Amino acid sequence: MANEHIHASWSGAFAGHPSVDGQIFSDSSRPTKTYQIGIYDQATHPQRPVSPGGVVDADPTAHPVIRVQNLKKTYMLGQTPVYALQDVSLDIYPGEFVAIMGPSGSGKSTFMNLLGCLDRPTQGTYWLAGYLVSRLSNEALARVRNRLIGFVFQSFNLLSKDTALSNVELPMVYAGISREVRQRRARQALHLVGLGSRMDHKPMQLSGGQQQRVAIARSLVNSPSLLLADEPTGNLDSRTSIEIMALLQELNRQGLTIVLVTHEPDIARYTSRQVVFRDGRLLRDELNLTPRSAEDELQQLLSANPQNEY
Ligand SMILES: Nc1ncnc2c1ncn2[C@@H]1O[C@H](COP(=O)(O)OP(=O)(O)O)[C@@H](O)[C@H]1O
Ligand SMILES: [Mg+2]
């Protein structure tokens, strides 16, 4: 496959309200960063200090997309409590590309499930784009989640009987968008991830990397402000992993905030911030001032081995 993905053009226009119809795939769309996310109380939500060097492409005057404070999650295994997360506090700002790292069992997926509003914390507070999540009804939460968050999983989670196009349409079905608009946006999203010629293929007829691209296209169609990816390259070979990271880097460059779980340091080096968990606690939180460029590495692989097209 040709490296169509370098033409990715995600326009992360997001005006900050679930009611806004994110027409991100209109033909005239240009990357715009409108970081008016949610409503904040200035007194209780101080602005982020400007990071030294300012290499991370995040707007220092913006409000966090994610703010968690003293987050705890305790599972009960019979009578025994499992302290999966303990006192985790963290802010993530618009435009960041964050890797969540740590050994197996350290709480990464638990944290992602809370960020994705797929589960509620035992204790602590979570503001998502200015919404205090604990105050939202289940219905409001589902609406906010569908609008604000795109999900990408290790196992792609595509419907096997449906075409790529139908899979990408699905989040828009839930959002009540008309069929015509759904199909137009799904096609644009598939072009965006370099699968313009694979729309009618079913997952079985696509490679792993292509399936993950379909999943990424699906995650973008409701114009999210945040992409959550739990081990998105976990089932892919190393070269395909670099392709997926090139796509994610390009989307991030255009303004999409990404939080990605990985246990592979090689993958984390493509991101601009690394957050490390250990035993449910935040062990380290560091900026990566020199993220690797996945696109450059792909080009190098290609020039080293010209007949090996990707
Ligand atoms: N539903 C659950 N019930 C009980 N314990 C759980 C559940 N989910 C996760 N855990 C435990 O919580 C801890 C953190 O798990 P997890 O967040 O999945 O870690 P990671 O994704 O870093 O591998 C582990 O000790 C795990 O066994
Ligand atoms: Mg996990």
Image (spheres, helix red, strand yellow):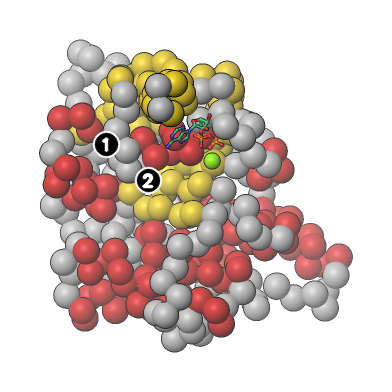
- Labels 2 and 1 touching (C-beta < 8 A): yes
Q: Which mark is residue 244?
A: none
**Residue ID at (26%, 74%):** 182
- Residue 232: x, y in percent? 55, 53
Q: Which residue is mark 2?
A: 226
- Residue 199: x, y in percent? 44, 82
- Secondary element under disc 1, as helix, strand or loop, is loop
- Which residue is the extreme one toward the front? 78
Rendered view: 127 above or below 199: above
Rendered view: 198 above or below 23: below
Disc 2 marks which amino acid?
Leu
Q: Quadrant of the C terminus?
A: bottom right
Q: Is residue 206 left or right of residue 25?
A: right
Disc 1 marks which amino acid?
Ala
- Residue 129: x, y in percent? 27, 36
Q: Is residue 116 visible?
A: yes
Rendered view: 65 above or below 280: below
Q: Is residue 48 visible?
A: no
User: Which of 101/16 is in front?
Assistant: 101
**Which quarter of the rendered image does ligand 2 occupy?**
top right
Disc 2/disc 1 C-alpha distance (Å): 9 Å
- Secondary element under disc 2, as helix, strand or loop, is strand
User: Which of 51/121 is in front?
Assistant: 121
Q: Earlier in the sequence, mark 2 or mark 1?
A: 1
Q: Quadrant of residue 298?
A: bottom right
User: Which of 207/19 is in front?
Assistant: 207
Judge the density around disc 2: few (<14), some (14-19), many (≥20) Cα neighbours within 10 Å. many
Q: Which residue is mark 1?
A: 129
**Residue ID at (16%, 66%):** 176
Judge the density around disc 1: few (<14), some (14-19), many (≥20) Cα neighbours within 10 Å. many
Q: Is residue 197 left or right of residue 255?
A: right
